[in-house]
Amino acid sequence: MFILSDLIIIQGIFRTVGIQDFADGQRRLIKEVTDAANNLLEFAKSFTKAVWLEHFDDKIICDRLFDVVHAPIVDDLTLPFFVTLP
């Protein structure tokens, strides 16, 4: 049901901006959305790196060793009911 309404809305947007071919409009839309997502990802990575280097250093030095004795075993973890294991 949602895909049908999305298709109707996208077709209306394409007609408004003058795109007649739906497939061509989809290709153009995907390219623009992909470019925007890649730019946002690069910004997030650069921002995270800048904050990390400002407040920490380029290395993390630990002078203590910790022994995790009560960590769960991966095979003992339960998954939600909608996941089936092979």
Image: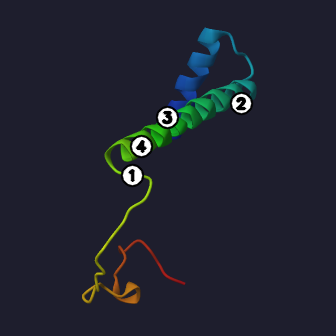
Identify residue type, mark 2: Arg
Q: Name the residue under label 3.
A: 43
Crowding at dot 2, Cα within 10 Å, few <14 / some 14-19 / many 20+, comes out as: few
Indicate which disc, 2 or 1, sits on the residue closer to the N terminus: 2
Residue 2 located left or right of residue 7? left
Q: Is mark 3 on a helix, strand or loop?
A: helix
The residues bearing labels 2 and 1 have C-alpha atoms spaced at a distance of 43 Å
Q: Which amino acid does label 4 sit on?
A: Thr
Mark 4 residue crowding within 10 angstroms, few (<14) / some (14–19) / many (20+) = few
Q: Which marked residue is nearer to the observer: mark 2 or mark 3?
A: 3
**Residue 36 on image: x %, y %:** 56, 30
Is 55 drawn above or below residue 73 in the view shown?
Answer: above
> In the rendered image, is residue 82 in sight?
yes
Position of 74 relative to 10 (above/below): below
Residue 1's place in the image compared with 16, above or below, is: below
Helix, strand or loop at label 2? It is helix
